Image (tube, coloured by chain):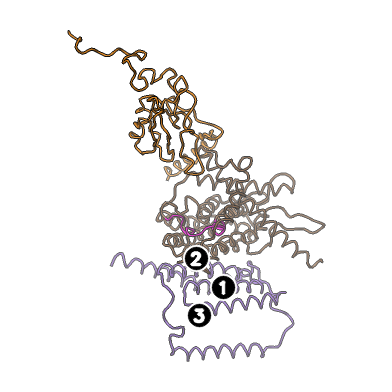
Chain colours: A orange, B purple, C brown
Amino acid sequence: MSGLLTGLFEAFATTLREMFRKPVTIQYPEEKKPLSARARWRIVLTRDPEGEERCVACYLCSAVCPVSCISMQSADRGDGRRYPEWFRINFGRCILCGMCEEACPTLAIQLTPDYEFCKYKALDMVYEKEDLLIDGTGKDREYNFYKHAGIGVVNPKGKNPDEYGPVDIRSNMP
Amino acid sequence: MNALAFYLLSAAAIFSTLMAISRRELIHAVVYLVLSFFSLALIFFMMGAPLIAALEVLIYAGAIMVLFLFIVMMLEMGAAKIPLTPFRKVWGPAVVIAAVIFFSMAILFFGTPQTAVSPMTAFVSPRRFGQALYTKYYLAVEAVSLLLLFALVGALYLGKRDNNP
Amino acid sequence: MNSCAPWLIIIIKAFLILFVTLTLAAYMVLAERKLLARMQDRYGPNRVGPFGLLQPLADVIKLITKEDILPTQADKFIYLIAPGVVAGTVLLTFAVVPFGAPVKIDGVTVQMPVIDLNVGALYFLAMSSLGVYGVALAGWSSGSKYSLFGGIRGSAQMISYELSMGLALVPAVMLAGSFSLNDIVAAQSRVPFVVYSPLAFAIFLISVAAESRRIPFDLAEAENELVAGYHTEYSGMRFGLFYIGEYVNIIVLSALAVTFYLGGWHGPGPLWLSFFWFFLKAAVIAFFFIWMRATLPRLRYDQLMHLGWKFLVPLSLANVLLTGFLALMFHWRNV
């Protein structure tokens, strides 16, 4: 009986004490929780330092995407430089896993810390290329894929910056 | 004003009682019976017996009918399949009893001289009611409470027998 | 005009009480949500209006505009009246509560209860026993098993706790020597009855909590077993009636606890402060109910019945004997 009473008293005291504590709720639209350093949300397509598209439409992101939310159509600009004719990400399906970013050989596709992109209609969640493409370079400001890889096959071989000349296998003697 | 209320309440009581005995759905019958008790209680209240009125609602409408309702709900009985006039044999005694009641009421109505004092002016306070109950009618009260005690013990016995046969 | 005046006063009082009580009930909902939230380290509703003060209005608008669904299995007639029974009996109880000192207007003394019944305490018990029908009938008529269970549980619980509630009122009636709530309040002008019979007050509070079917006694609507119990099938304003009924019930029962045991509207200061004192005391009791909801878990059905029949009823019977004995012994009242 006395155990019951002290139990009751403790319970009532606890709730009363908690009543005067500051609530732990973060009131979202006004107060925002600080994001962690590596938080990743909305996906963008970046440009290289010269302002050209980085994406070479290699389909690697589309292939690796576990929910198949990325689709595109590759095209050639004429000089051998590839680019996506259209590029589409359905954020209604995207799970923000970041595998596309890992797969991307040109650092074109990147995840940003912007998480507030809810829409009223499901179709508005489908982002086209013009919605995805940004003017900046994103995370790596210096990186320029074509500087190293060249566009198409350059003649004579090995004339790209930082590129070694072709190896003469006959002279490659020990 | 009082007369109007009285006739309205009486009509409600008679109507709901008739409905109570003629409904096939048991729950509806119970609800109408509660309504009947309620209008009866209001008539009692108007006639100057507030204690009786309160007890009528409290005990009959509030307790006994709830038990009725409870049992009906528990047994989950649907609408009764039997005809409304089940026992032809009962009709004879019923008519005889109704006739006796009707004639005694007629005698009361026409046999006693009409008095100017309306019965509605009489008023019994709860205190006087209680004093009368415990001084003048104490024997009846004791008898009834003994009866209730027997009923309680009987119910206990019936309830226990299932556990220890 | 003179003969008409009392009627007019009664009608005005009834309308005032209806208006004030319903508004209070709406804000009781807000207060409960706020307090519960604070006790759980949350903020509670604070979006609609300053401090969420317009939340009740938003709730009511939502409830009114929602569809009123009639299940195909339901018994139409009873299904439609059951919410009215719950809310109606609770609101009717307020007719006998003296929530302030008598006021003199234009030479006419106006008593505060709508009607000063000389069987006021019994009237309260009668109304609360009629309230059982709302729960039982709503549960039965919905044509759903959850509702039926809720209805049966609710009615069984209310019948059981009515007993200890009635017995807990006996000491107050005994000490005042009257069923009239006005007389009971008048008898407490110096010392409230809780001093004479604290046990009765405690039993009354517990029984009242069970009577209003709230946590920890909300078996009739236990949401993790019975969805929402007897009002599972209800929607729109009919559900709103159950909801409002519950909160009006808290207000009425707090007011009655104050009337029976805490000295009613009596308090220090001038007479016009009586309304304030009454309101303050009732608010404290109402806060206690909310506090209890935040603190205690729900009882199991057998624990509920055990507490009611094997603990509270014998205890209140013993308390009636004890209070009677002490009252005679020390001449607490010239009976």
Check disc 1 and report the residue beneath it.
B37
Pointer 3 indicates a residue of which chain? B
Q: Residue C232 magenta-drawn? A: yes
- Amino acid type indicated by mark 1: Phe
Neighbour class for label 1 at 10 Å: few (<14), some, many (≥20)?
Answer: many
Side (left or right) of C39 relative to C332? left
| A130, B22: nearer the viewer | A130
- Label 2, secondary structure: give it: helix
Q: Total marks drawn?
A: 3
- Amino acid type indicated by mark 2: Leu
Q: Position of residue C213 (x, y in %)?
A: 50, 55
| C48, A73: nearer the viewer | A73
Q: Is residue C216 above or below residue B115?
A: above
Check disc 2 and report the residue beneath it.
C137
Q: Where are the magenta residues, as a range?
A: C226-242
The answer as to whether the residues below labels 1 and 3 share one chain is yes
Q: Position of residue B136 (x, y in %)?
A: 59, 74
Q: Quadrant of the C terminus of chain B?
A: bottom left
- The label number, if any, that marks residue B22 in the structure image: 3
The residue that appears at 59% across and 67% down in the rendered structure is: B54
